[in-house]
Image (tube, rainbow, N blue to C red):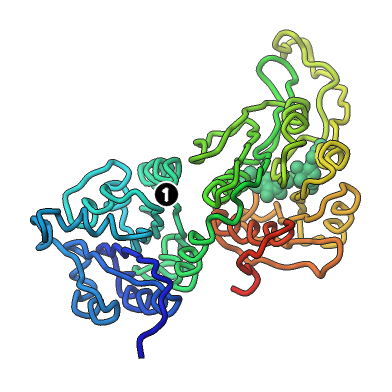
Amino acid sequence: MEARTSGRRILLGVTGGIAAYKSPELVRRLRDAGFEVQCILTPTAAAFVSALTLEVVSGSPVLGEEYLQPGVGGAELHIQAAARADLLLVAPATAHTLAALALGLADNMLLTTALAFTGPVLVAPAMHAAMWNQPAVAARVAELCARGVEIVGPVEGALASGELGIGRMAEVPELVAAVQRRFAAGLLAGRHLLVAAGPTHEPIDPVRFLGNRSSGKMGFALAAEAARRGARVSLIAGPVALPTPAGVERFDVETALEMEARVHALAPSADVIVLAAAVADFRPLAAAPAKIKRSAGVPQIELVANPDILAGLAAVAPRALRVGFAAETGDDDAEAARKLLAKGAHLLVANDVSRSDIGFGSDQNEVTVHWRDREPLRLSRRPKSQLAGDLLDLITRELPGSDPVDATAR
Ligand code: PMT
């Protein structure tokens, strides 16, 4: 009996890494989820997984170099393949293919097809941790992200070398879930999401400030994913060195007072406000007009409290769903639950910022989500990009008139 399909067609690009041995399983699971799958093998991938295996499990001809020739009816096959697909997933993606995709190179069947493809692109990198951590790779990943490409993984675990580190391809169920999420993309259409991200810098004098270690990654991941899901996204960014995600309107601010002013200006039209920013609680009463000289001795700096932006939101955006984060040192559920109520939030996402593998600056996070009327939900450590999707699933579920996918079911 024929399996029922969604009619959605996935092009699966398989490149030459050891994780390619998982491709037949990935094809199977995608088909189980109702997708039609056509595979494209790069020349090196063919050394790791056979075209015949992929052809049998996908039920479609596998595209390779031999097809880089004029196709049926005068149109070239890579153009046809790109035109017929709803989504391109490259898994595993080697460092070479990542860079080639970022640069727009087109010297194999996968790259030429990718260049002709205009729909959503998901890329699942897989490589040794030493390669993944190279600035050259990070720069290509940032370029792809800025163009709206979704990077799924990599995750931490045993690498092909036997060492432990970040670089393993995301697991097959995660890849299938990421593909499914893309087809839920319209879920936030028509909604306005306001996200505040990064630290604030409170000037002491023209060269010094009070600040914290927030990189902005968590908030930027939320903004990027919300934009992919069709939301209008306003991102208020403290001083961070991150590119603006595709489709997001960005407002740069420096201090807590500037962040508050921008939040208040945008909040009245927002359906959801997410404060992932690490707002400084205190600022110097007055910034010195000139650099404070060491020779003048140790300065006495009087601090005053900054406004609590989250706590003030109920007054300026009473109908918006208000989501806060809580930076705790340790797992302090009682403190997170206190903040949820004290700050008038609907959801509070607590993370342990004393850990170096999550929280500040890390690409991964692990959180506990607190509600006013439900038991807290633990979301185990995962890439911030993936966590952003899971949090948006939960947030969407709280919005009136939504029938979103269930993050907790995964
Ligand atoms: O930016 P990354 O490097 O990716 O790191 C992510 C993160 C650790 C910064 C993020 O996940 C996080 O925890 N953000 C909240 C940090 C924080 O300020 O926590 P808090 O417990 O001090 O504040 C609780 C909530 O009140 C937060 O939503 C905060 O934005 C808000 N707040 C705090 C102080 C203040 N004056 N005004 C506020 O609105």
Residue extending farthest to the front is 73
From the viewer's side, name the closer residue of 45 and 30. Answer: 30
Q: Measured along the vertical axis of the image, is residue 266 above or below residue 133? A: above
Left or right of 5: which side holds 312? right
Residue 171 % position (x, y): 45, 71
Residue 59 % position (x, y): 26, 79
Residue shown at the point (71%, 8%) measured from the top left = 290
Left or right of 154: which side holds 265? right
User: Within 8 Å of ligand 1, the CB of disc 1?
Assistant: no
From the viewer's side, name the closer residue of 81 and 380. Answer: 81
Residue shown at the point (72%, 11%) measured from the top left = 293
Left or right of 312: which side holds 84? left
Q: Measured along the vertical axis of the image, is residue 291 above or below residue 347? A: above
Kindly indicate the quadrant of the structure image that contains residue 375.
bottom right
Residue shown at the point (21%, 51%) measured from the top left = 112
Residue extending farthest to the bottom is 1
Q: Can I make out residue 128 in this image?
A: no
Residue identified by numbered label 1: 149
From the viewer's side, name the closer residue of 89 and 102. Answer: 89
Q: Can I make out residue 202 in this image?
A: yes
Amino acid type at circle 1 is Val
Q: Measured along the vertical axis of the image, is residue 321 above or below residue 244? A: below
From the viewer's side, name the closer residue of 155 and 30. Answer: 30
Residue 326 % position (x, y): 77, 51
Residue extending farthest to the top is 290
- Bin the neighbour count of mark 1 within 10 Å (Cα to Cα): few under 14, some 14-19, many 20 and up: many
Quarter of the picture for ligand 1? Answer: top right
Q: Secondary structure at mark 1?
A: loop
> Which part of the image, by quadrant, shows the C terminus?
bottom right
